[in-house]
Image (cartoon, rainbow, N blue to C red):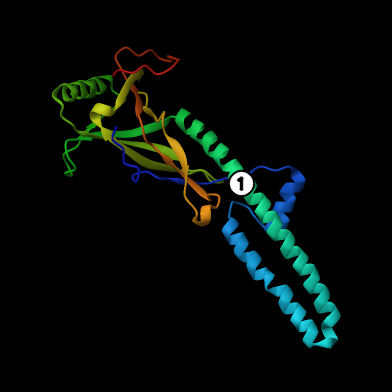
Amino acid sequence: MSDEPGLLRPEVPVALAPLHRSPHLLRCRVTGLTGPEFARAQRVTVVWAVLPPALTLTGLLVPAVRTAALGCAALLGLLVLTRAVLLMVFERRQQRYEPRWLAERTVALRRQEFPVLRCSVRYDETPGLARVYDLTSGDQVGRLLDRRARERAAGTHSRATLEFVWATRGRERVSAVAEVRRELTELELLTVRPDGAQARVRFPQARYRPVPEPGRRPARRAYWELSGPVLVAAAGAGDREGASGPWVSAR
């Protein structure tokens, strides 16, 4: 099965492990975490850790502010220690939660259908030699199936490129265009759509993977990997309007 893992890597932020209200407020107020930014939070803690010794030294050298300086140093030292311990606890919790979050996202990705904008096939990478097939037309899908059958029989290989639409995550959902490439003989065309209906594509073995962080820290972002079969629901001669049930392959 051909695949180009570097071709399509839309990254999404990894969610923090869910907490009950009180621990959630503690995490927000004391650590300032809004995402799994544990490395940054640890750097901030290190900077804060310099302040208690500095205040203590100031109090010892300047008798006029000794009481206030030593009091502030003690309170700040307690805060830094509490923050360091909480960061360690929350980071361990995040490490346990991350595989479950990735698994849930992977299940949703494998079930998702993406609208197909364009299907083109070429024998090589020379610009201008690609042929575009309209997957909303049963006639053109039939021609594409015939071409795939001939290539399978002859052992020849051409390259199919599918351009499809996906929606970015976040407060403002924005539609973006992405593409995936396979050899035409590997493309699974399923004639389950009525003529004129937009084709859809699914990736039943796709998965989300974490973007590695230095020091084996919890991932801040994850990307999808569209490996494995590519299932395209296109127009077909035997389609019925509103047909339900699983896609049936025309392999």
The C terminus lies in quadrant: top left
Say which of 230 and 143 sits in front.
230
Q: Position of residue 119 (x, y in %)?
A: 28, 33
Label 1 CA crowd tier, 10 Å (few <14, some 14–19, many 20+): many
Q: Position of residue 235 (x, y in %)?
A: 32, 20
Q: Residue furthest left?
A: 154
Say which of 61 and 195 sits in front.
61
The N terminus lies in quadrant: top left
Asked if 150 appears above or below 69 in the picture, the reply is above
Q: Position of residue 203 (x, y in %)?
A: 40, 31
Type of amino acid under label 1: Gln
Say which of 97 and 195 sits in front.
97
Task: Describe the element under mark 1 as helix, strand or loop.
Answer: helix
Q: Is residue 16 visible?
A: no
Q: Residue at x 72, y 58 (%)?
A: 30
Q: Residue at x 29, y 28 (%)?
A: 187
Image quarter for residue 74? bottom right
Q: Position of residue 85 (x, y in %)?
A: 70, 57
| Residue at the disc numbered 1 | 94
Q: Residue at x 47, y 39 (%)?
A: 208
Q: Residue at x 77, y 47 (%)?
A: 22
